[in-house]
Image (tube, rainbow, N blue to C red):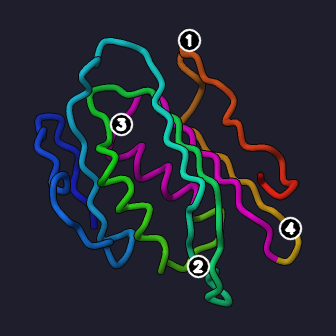
Amino acid sequence: MSDTPDPAHSAPRFLGQQTALPASPGEALLDYVPNPRAGALYLVRFAVPEFTSLCPVTGAPDFAHLVIDYAPSETIVESKSLKLFLGSFRNHNGFHEDVTVGIGQRLAAEMQPRWLRIGGYWYPRGGIPIDVFWQTGAVPEGLWVPEQGVAGYRGRG
């Protein structure tokens, strides 16, 4: 399903070459590279405003704005592998809660950051927007964590 992170692995598999989207999240591999500032407490944010997956009941597309924040420890996730992983959800059936929390749990389990949170701001289906939030625990003392900056639903503009 996934590779275990190896902090010594510093040669990303996907950079510099054309890479097809994985067929499913389970087939997607994430690359982790050594944290160049392993001793520093800092925050990394990935904003994914055009995330898609499929409704597990109807098969219709679901759209979300994801925000992933993490404080690295020994490794950081390589962004192209993260894009491929997230893109693999385009043909994946899953409830908003399962998809959002599953992404956060996989990143946390493999990368083992000091702290991680994910916000899934799902656009309405049936007139109801669903926002899903998950984090690994309390924010580390001294870590600056700005607001995720995604407005409550009013067109998510």
Name which residue type carries label 1.
Glu
- Is 23 placed above or below 4 here? below
Location of the N terminus by quadrant is: bottom left
Please provide the residue range marked out in magenta: 100-125
Q: Marks 4 and 1: which is nearer the front?
A: 4
- Earlier in the chain: of badge 1 and badge 3, it is 3
Q: Based on the picture, tell me whether residue 143 belongs to the magenta stretch.
A: no
- Earlier in the chain: of badge 2 and badge 1, it is 2
Callout 1 touching callout 3 (CB < 8 Å):
no
According to the picture, the residue beneath numbered tag 2 turns out to be: 54
Q: Nearer the viewer, residue 109 or 31?
A: 31
Q: Is residue 15 left or right of residue 94?
A: left
Tell me if mark 1 has few (under 14), some (14-19) or many (20+) residues whose alpha carbon lies within 10 angstroms of its own.
few
- Earlier in the chain: of badge 4 and badge 2, it is 2
Name which residue type carries label 4.
Ile
Callout 2 touching callout 1 (CB < 8 Å):
no
Q: Secondary structure at mark 2?
A: strand
- Earlier in the chain: of badge 4 and badge 3, it is 3
- Earlier in the chain: of badge 4 and badge 1, it is 4
Tell me if mark 2 has few (under 14), some (14-19) or many (20+) residues whose alpha carbon lies within 10 angstroms of its own.
many
Q: Which picture quadrant has residue 93? A: bottom right
According to the picture, the residue beneath numbered tag 4 turns out to be: 128
